[in-house]
Amino acid sequence: MEIGNSLKEAREARKLSLEEVEEETKIRRKYLQALENEQYEVLPGQVYAKAFLKNYARFLNLNVEEVMAAFNHSPAEEAPQPQDSNNISRTEPELKRGQKPRYWLYLATVVMVMGLTVSVYYTVRSIGFNHPARGEFKTEEQNQAPPNPSVGQQPPTEEPINKQEGVRLTFSVTKNTCWMRVIVDGAPAFQGEVPAGQTQEFTGTEKISFRLGNAGVVQVQLNGQDLGFLGEEGAVIDREFTSSPTG
């Protein structure tokens, strides 16, 4: 299956331009063009490449499973290293063609460098213990000394508390159906209708933005906290939640 041609033909069959697809899917035009040209190196990594391709195929009503299976078997997912193999194949014969003097010279040089490195390491370490003004050695001796009750001393084991909690959103459709579109950390994660009784959950590092086409039938939870319904039945809403530091 030629992924790029399938995407382009499906888009042209629907008489859609790349600009129109960009507006609907929120995927940048240059990434859409890269998908149609199968230039996956343009995309920002394999995770985003798969997410963009999955959402683009779903938007064009293509068979998502077939498209992703073809992508997983494409050269973009393989990582051959012919250069390294060639280097190995060229290097081994050279070592076998009687260049033993160079080998022993190289080995002797390595041993000398390692010996010098060890010597310098222990010399510096010895100097560090004799002169505790150095940062890391001073800390080690302070840990061994009795506590100093002087005013202004800061505990050496204090850790930063501004860790990021992340964002986790759960959507539970209580009745009827609801169309929704979810974007996680700037990448489209889902777009489509969710029937009653089903739940969708998304986790992001920085932020999650979404649109609900029927806000009055969807219960929303943020990081386990129930936010209830964010609007009336039939109301279309757009929201965005960002991560905040814990502690």
Image (tube, grey):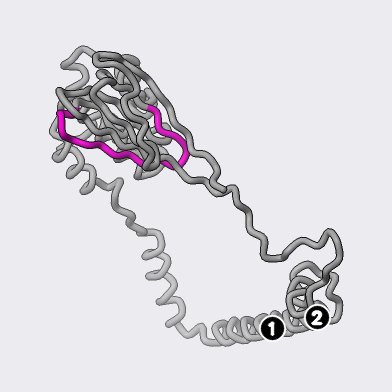
Q: Looking at the image, is 152 positioned above or below residue 223?
A: below
Quadrant of the rendered image containing residue 230:
top left
Pick whichever, 197 or 203, lies toward us. Answer: 197
Q: Residue 214 at what x, y percent from top left? A: 25, 19
Q: Residue 106 at what x, y percent from top left? A: 59, 81
The residue that disc 2 covers is 129
Distance from Cα at disc 2 to Cα at disc 1? 17 Å
Say few, some or many: other residues with alpha carbon within 10 Å of mark 1 (under 14 / 14 to 19 / 20 or more): few
Q: Looking at the image, is 199 positioned above or below residue 246?
A: above
Image quadrant in which the N terminus is located: top left
- 231 relative to 44 in the view: left or right: left
Pick whichever, 233 or 77, lies toward us. Answer: 233
The amino acid on which the numbered mark 1 sits, given as a three-letter code, is Val
Q: Which mark is residue 218?
A: none
The residue that disc 1 covers is 118
Magenta span: 194-209
Pick whichever, 227 or 173, lies toward us. Answer: 227
- 191 relative to 149 in the view: left or right: left
